Image (cartoon, grey):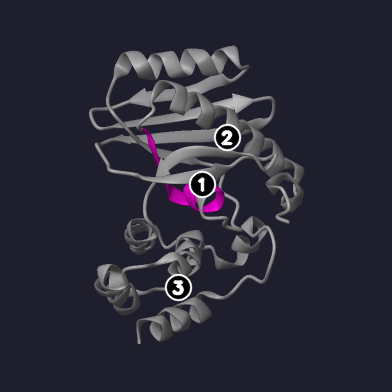
Amino acid sequence: MKIPLGLRIKRKKHRDIAFLQDIIVEKLYEIFPDCVIHGGTAIWRCYNGNRFSDDIDVYLEKNINKINLLFEELKKEGFEIIKKRIKENSLFSILKFDNAEIKLESVFKKVKGTLSEYETLEGNLITVYTLLAENLIKEKIKAYLKRRKMRDLYDIFYLLRFVKEKEKIKKDLAILITEFKQPLDEDEFKTLILYGIVPRASEIIEYIRRWLK
């Protein structure tokens, strides 16, 4: 029997943020039924990941009226809108509830998602759209090479177990290995892992090399 997510999270701060994420995701799909979740929260919630992620990254249609409605609904739930910035192709926002803050970010882009089940804090499942593991890995490789965050490298390692079409990502992984530089935040990363060991960056790169053979 699977242990509910809430019992797998050790830190109260992380549980509080997870609860607020659930509210935001439910409201998102009420207003944007074709919304596609990606990034760390998609990996954590839809792929049973063990790395905590506090941001919510989505692909949405650009509909200002719907976006404003979303934030009005979130305010009714008790959220304070710290920042809401809408640009030509993106949305960046910071939401606060009590002492917890969450970033909700979106790229306005039509993306074909795949059906998945998002696990809530209580262990319930919400049907959502997310990206295939291969596409999430491609995004994470680009992110790592740009900002050198350990979480991106770890997510690549974790997602490899879900890959069904190896050929789609072999070239991208080869580029990662060739251009790899040590992460800038490796020592602080362990606080984000909910359970299990925390591999070093060098171990992950070696794992990827073996996986490619």
Answer yes or no: do the residues labelled 3 and 1 have beta carbons within 8 Å?
A: no
Residue 210 location (% of width, % of height): 42, 86
Above/below status of 176 relative to 152: below
At a point 70% along the width and 55% down the height, the residue shown is: 2
Q: CA distance from mark 2 to mark 1?
A: 9 Å
* Residue position marked by numbered label 3 in the rendering: 182
Residue 114 in the figure: left or right of residue 118: left
Quadrant where the N terminus is found in the figure: bottom right
* Residue position marked by numbered label 1 in the rendering: 41
Front of the two marks 2 and 3: 2
Residue 31 location (% of width, % of height): 41, 21
* Residue position marked by numbered label 2 in the rendering: 21
At a point 59% along the width and 26% down the height, the residue shown is: 96
Residue 40 in the figure: left or right of residue 114: right
Above/below status of 185 relative to 182: above
Residue type marked 1: Thr
At a point 51% along the width and 14% down the height, the residue shown is: 73
User: Badge 3, how many Cα within 10 Å: few under 14, some, many 20+?
Assistant: few
Residue type marked 2: Gln
At a point 36% along the width and 35% down the height, the residue shown is: 106
Q: CA distance from mark 3 to mark 1?
A: 24 Å
Above/below status of 174 relative to 156: below
Segment tinted magenta in the rendering: 35-45
